[in-house]
Amino acid sequence: MAAAAADDDVKLESFLQWLQANGADLRGCMIRACGGKGFGVFSTAVPDPGSNDGNSPLLSPSPELTRLIRALRRYLDMLPSTFGSSLWFTEEELAELEGTTLHRATVIQRKSVQSSFDEKVKGLVEDLLHVDESASLIEVLFEDFLWANSIFWTRALNIPLPHSYVFPGSCGDEQIGTGNDACYSGPPAQQEIDNTAKDHSADENSKSSNTESIWVEGLVPGIDFCNHNVKALATWEVDSVGNATGIPASMYLLLADKSSAEAGAEICINYGNKGNEELLYLYGFVVDNNPDDYLMVHYPLEALRQIQSADTKMQLLEMQEFMSTLRTIATQEHELEQVASLLGEVGSSEDREISDAEIQSAIWEVCGDQGALGLLVDLLGVKMAELEEGSGTEASDTELLEQFDSIRSEDYASESDEKHKKKSKINYRSCIVYRRGQKQLTRLFLREAEHLLELSAKEQT
């Protein structure tokens, strides 16, 4: 353990020298080890009013692969070699997620990453390596691509950059996207998660003095060592013209509340209002009692195709919200005819296309909420059955969590395998925290849906 710590110290010192050589200024802060979280950014003193913490110039990629690798060597040495995200789980660890949306998303993404490597990446990287004779004998492994993929998606920041910086020499009169049009380009399987969890990181963590900007994902050495905290001490900002840092197109940390930055306090940023499903999928950690946790409920597409008037209902389902979708699916044949009649009256009175809001209003007026609530109760019941079949009850998860938290790191068999066992313990604990939260949400939503269904039934009678 002492040898590993000394090795980390050497890498850190080399990296700090590299940051300084490349124009980074650690003003009022420092990077150091922070236990199981790897490295973090910490305050060294209470800053003067109006001061910034640290800034990192954005590095343009070198056209020569070997030159780029050598230039980033000391940065790459600081990065983790493994991750706690579900993509890196062993089969035994992944089995702890059975019955959850995250299990399904992980399986899909593993196949997608493997396919990308086999069909695109492997051949391309081999061609690039052959350009450098010294690297021509290096074997390109899937594990290397998985590592690079994880490095990017666990550390990338959504950065608003001037159009001229992203496309130097291009016409300035072209249509330019602004911050309001920004979107997060996550891995394919993550789209399933992103449908219910908005990514607020761009709004909370970044500002740009240049309103005409293009949002891109990128690595910013230094700032990317900031860990996540909902009550973050700092935000990261872009200095497009260099007014704050003296370096155009640079980034810097700005303390949100300078009076709270005591010497030695870790300086965290907020990754966004993310539930444990997204945090574990992307970053490899969970938050106990996460206030932003959410539940995904699926209506199988195969089942939708088998119900009465499936084609008509699928046309009505476009651009509908959750309860409106359930009302549409639960609609009976005779109710569909009444909905069509109402919409026909609207369409005949005015020569225009019927809006989504009018479609939803017509369905609600004809069907009410009883059918939708009944369907919701059924879906939540199926969800709970899947969760409990996969990993037991909420009570059993609570008991397991108490057992895990009672185990001390000193109880491990030997120092040599302590790190591996500790990592495995963290992964198992993350699985339990996440799936227990899913069961809690399902139980609470199911209770509320049953109550509303009962009230709706009384109103009908």
Image (cartoon, rainbow, N blue to C red):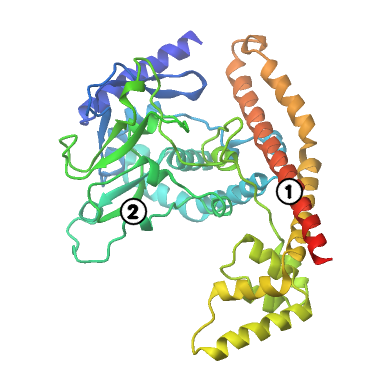
User: Which residue bears the numbered disc 2?
Assistant: 179
Tell me residue 113's x, y (percent): 54, 49
Q: Camera-side residue: 164 or 364?
A: 364
Q: Secondary structure at mark 2?
A: helix
User: Which residue bears the numbered disc 1?
Assistant: 448
Residue at horizontal 72%, vertical 43%? 444
Residue at the extreme right of the image, as rendered: 461
Q: Nearer the viewer, mark 2 or mark 1?
A: 1
Determine the image quadrant of residue 281: top right
| The C terminus, quarter of image | bottom right
Residue at horizontal 63%, vertical 60%? 322
Amino acid at dot 1: Glu
Determine the image quadrant of residue 175: bottom left
Tell me residue 162's x, y (percent): 23, 52
Q: Are marks 2 and 1 in contact (CB under 8 Å)?
A: no
Tell me residue 41's x, y (percent): 37, 24
Determine the image quadrant of residue 77: top left
